[in-house]
Amino acid sequence: MIAPRIIAWHHPTTTSLRCTARRSFNSTTALCNRPSIGPKPSLNIKHIRENPDLYSQTCVERNYIRQQLYPQTIVRLFEEWKELQRNARTLRQKNNDIRTKLSHAKTFSGIEAPEASAEPHNEADLLQEAKQLKSDIGKVESQEDVLNERIESLAIGLPNFTSEETPIGAEPRVLGYINEHPNFAASSHDHTWRNHVHIGKEFDLLDFASAGTTTGWGWYYLKNEAALLEQALIQYAMSVAMRHGFSTVSPPSIVYTHIANACGFHPRDQGGEQQTYAIAQKEDGHTTSRGEERSPEKTLAGTAEIPFASMKANTTMTEHELPLRIVGASRCYRAEAGARGAETKGLYRVHEFTKVEMFAWTMKDKEQAAFNAMFAVQREILQNLSLHCRILEMPSADLGASATRKLDIEAFFPSRREKNDGWGEVTSASICTDYQTRRLNTRVKMSSSSSKTGFPSTVNGTALAVPRVLAALLENGWNEREKRIEIPTVLHQWMHGTTYIQKKPAT
């Protein structure tokens, strides 16, 4: 089904360069705030140098405007680095010559040899020259380190290649639909009662006002049956994924910032908008008042994809362990809840939510199988929830840094008819090739060789994001005749006998 345009990052020769600078992160210096405990990336910088135009074109396709000049800059910096290497070799040769002269100038007993008097330089002059050469060599090596850091910083900032399945540009391609479009009987109350915000208020399910006082815009309280629905949706999604062969993992929601960066999640997007929440540190700088290295910066995870991917950081798996497929529920935190407006009102775009996430490590030739397995889970869940959805092949401009291909599934929201004809994303799935594993130093030992290792591919997908699916269920489940909300049958076993939601009597 997928035939990658380029096999991303898989090449026999790999150049790994150190990154020790401790600058604040931005999108152009992706892992240069990596602390000493962080995974050491292993990028194929040689391939970038040999194919700069290919990488630049990928940046253009992805709308990574700033990064499109990075490949040419890497080529230029590498030429500067080679010149420094030549200079260093010359200096080291001079230094070796002086060492030879000094060793010949003395006998093993320490008495000056008779022939040493014919040497034009005395020992003191040679020692002074050797000292200067050592200093000059140190300066050149420092310059080399700076160039290495800059090259790696630029290389890490480049996005993954784009698959041949991906439409180039900004328009997605519709691949198909799930369930029939609902034919609601026309009603003068549709505009009100097909809106989850109004339903949530009238049925005492959602409380945005109290959340605004407690935390601010973009947060919410789920109450009564809505709180039960959240747990029912989690349990249902987990049960479907487990039946499809996924093992369960409960991940942390706080991760090191350098780990999030390695997975392709950056504090700011291409437009400079804040994307993540950073955890405040007690002390500024890189060391504590006692001179100890400060604990690395931490971030609230925007998705369980990040802690899942880093479970295998700095490890080597065996080929027979793959594919390794896991699923888990976690709280997710997104700073980019978007501008306020009717299209983002309510549960559609929030800062904190529960999501059931799928993740897999697999060999390169098994990427598509893992991708298909996740899509099968997504399709089954949405189909059994009776939500009308469409399947989209997402365009290059919509792909994140790590993804080579991405499928979205959008559900129909009656309240969003004036926005994108009612469609709104509820799940996505991405193939990331070895983009993340190279940055997290996750390796796989090849069964064909006792010593050869490679980098496995990663695939991720949303099984279910609670707020949007909950909103879609409230809007699509509204029964105008009975004035109640019907709950999908597959959720009944987790709803403690509740099969529909009706308005609470006034107290």
Image (cartoon, rainbow, N blue to C red):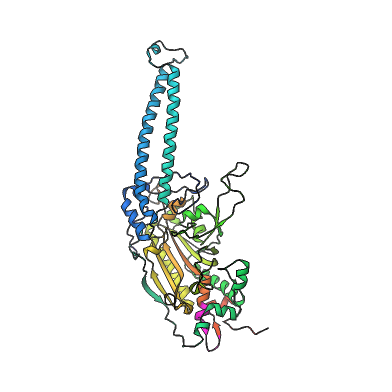
| Residue 12 in view in this figure | no
Q: Is residue 212 left or right of residue 8?
A: right
Q: Quadrant of the C terminus?
A: bottom right
- Residue 338, x across and y down, in percent: 49, 67
Q: How many labels does the image show?
A: 0
Residue at 51%, 61% in the rendered image: 302
Q: Is residue 484 left or right of residue 157?
A: right
Is 503 placed above or below 155 here? below
| Residue 493 in view in this figure | yes
Residue that sits furthest to the top in the current view: 114
Q: Which of 65 and 49 is in front in this view?
A: 65
Is 501 placed above or below 447 here? below
Residue at 44%, 67% in the rendered image: 428
Q: Quadrant of the N terminus?
A: bottom left
- Residue 202, x across and y down, in percent: 59, 81
Query: Is-magenta flag for residue 416?
Result: no
Is 191 placed above or below 165 here? below
- Residue 307, x across and y down, in percent: 52, 58
Residue that sits furthest to the right in the current view: 507
Residue 292, quarter of the rendered image: top right
Residue at 48%, 45% in the rendered image: 21
What span is in magenta? 473-483
Q: Which of 12 and 255 is in front in this view?
A: 255
- Residue 437, x across and y down, in percent: 44, 53
Q: Which of 384 and 123 is in front in this view?
A: 123
Query: Is-magenta flag for residue 479?
Result: yes
